[in-house]
């Protein structure tokens, strides 16, 4: 079994990474929490060379990113070079565009597009990975979008960034569901919150209804190398405080499983 490295999804701190100076302070804050593992998402319009310099200066391990699908389709060569600058081999997509979600045909059209992206990335020893929400678990006539993704994509071209909170909101047991993705996950998102609600509320880790310990054990069993904390909203006072509280909880879970 592998002990996952734990880190921070910087989308949680997106208000603090919109310019170079704030991003430098945020990297320092993250290092102060006791980790150099980050996912870069939601960052502001900072020159790629400057981002790479910060990654180098703080010796950050960028395990994955989230990038717009339009850039993957139309600006992939530049994306590849930007990721090489920061030493990141996995380009993630935060969610499939709305126009592909409504029918099985649309989902399969999306898959064809990602296959081309995946092939180009593979040629550079890089990977495409998809981050789920809850809508991918809705029934589409006996199948879900996730079923189609798992059954009809090439594992070498289509990876996953499973979000354990959204898996549970979608009606599945996340610790068990992770086993369906065996061998296709580099980074797992740890998120917590209310589940049975008309408007589910995201919380700090350890405050909600997700069995984080069971999910951590599953990640260990599946040799998933990275776990990153992510919180979209509903912060305790501010995102920095929520990150501090949640990362302490994640450190505790890691220690309890060591």
Image (tube, grey):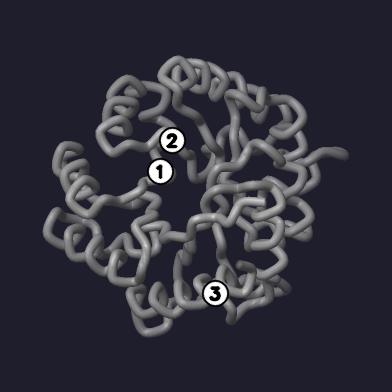
Asked whether the beta carbons under mark 2 and mark 3 sit within 8 Å of each other, the answer is no
Pointer 2 or 1: first along the chain: 1
SS state under label 2: strand
Q: Nearer the viewer, residue 45 or 187?
A: 187
Q: Position of residue 185 (x, y in %)?
A: 60, 42
- Mark 2–mark 1 distance (CA, rounded to whole Å): 5 Å
> Contact (CB < 8 A) between labels 2 and 1?
yes
- Image point (58%, 24%), residue name: 157
The residue at which mark 3 appears reads as: 205
When asked about the image quadrant of residue 167, the answer is: bottom right
Identify which residue, 8 or 253, lies in the foreground.
253
Q: Can residue 234 be seen from the camera position used here? A: no
Q: CA distance from mark 1 to mark 3?
A: 21 Å
Expressed as whole percent of the image width and height from the top left, the position of residue 193 reads: 60, 73
User: At which x and y percent is residue 29?
Assistant: 26, 69
Q: Residues within 10 Å of mark 1 (few under 14, many from 20)?
A: many
Inspect this view and state whether residue 132 appears.
yes
In primary-sequence order, the first of circles 2 and 3 is 2
Residue under label 2, please give it. Answer: 91
The residue that mark 1 highlights is 65
Q: Residue furthest right?
A: 142
């Amino acid at each position: 079994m592998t002990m996952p490295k734990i880190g921070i999804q910087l989308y949680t701190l997106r208000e603090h990474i919109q310019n170079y100076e704030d991003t430098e302070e945020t990297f320092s804050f993250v290092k102060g929490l006791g980790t150099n593992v980050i996912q870069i998402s939601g960052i502001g319009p900072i020159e790629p060379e400057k981002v790479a310099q910060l990654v180098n200066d703080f010796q950050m391990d960028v395990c994955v990113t989230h990038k717009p699908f339009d850039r993957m389709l139309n600006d992939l060569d530049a994306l590849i070079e930007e990721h090489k600058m920061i030493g990141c081999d996995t380009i993630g997509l935060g969610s499939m565009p709305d126009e592909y979600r409504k029918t099985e045909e649309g989902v399969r059209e999306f898959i064809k597009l990602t296959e081309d992206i995946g092939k180009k990335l593979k040629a550079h020893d890089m990977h495409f990975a998809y981050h789920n929400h809850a809508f991918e678990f809705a029934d589409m006539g006996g199948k879900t979008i996730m079923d189609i993704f798992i059954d009809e994509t090439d594992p070498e071209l289509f990876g996953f960034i499973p979000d354990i909170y959204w898996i549970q909101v979608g009606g599945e047991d996340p610790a068990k569901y992770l086993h369906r993705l065996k061998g296709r996950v580099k980074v797992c998102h740890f998120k917590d919150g209310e589940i049975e609600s008309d408007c589910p509320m995201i919380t700090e880790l350890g405050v909600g209804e997700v069995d984080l310990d069971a999910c951590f054990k599953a990640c260990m069993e599946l040799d998933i190398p990275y776990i990153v904390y992510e919180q979209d909203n509903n912060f305790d006072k501010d995102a920095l405080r929520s990150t501090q509280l949640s990362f302490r909880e994640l450190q505790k879970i890691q220690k309890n499983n060591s």
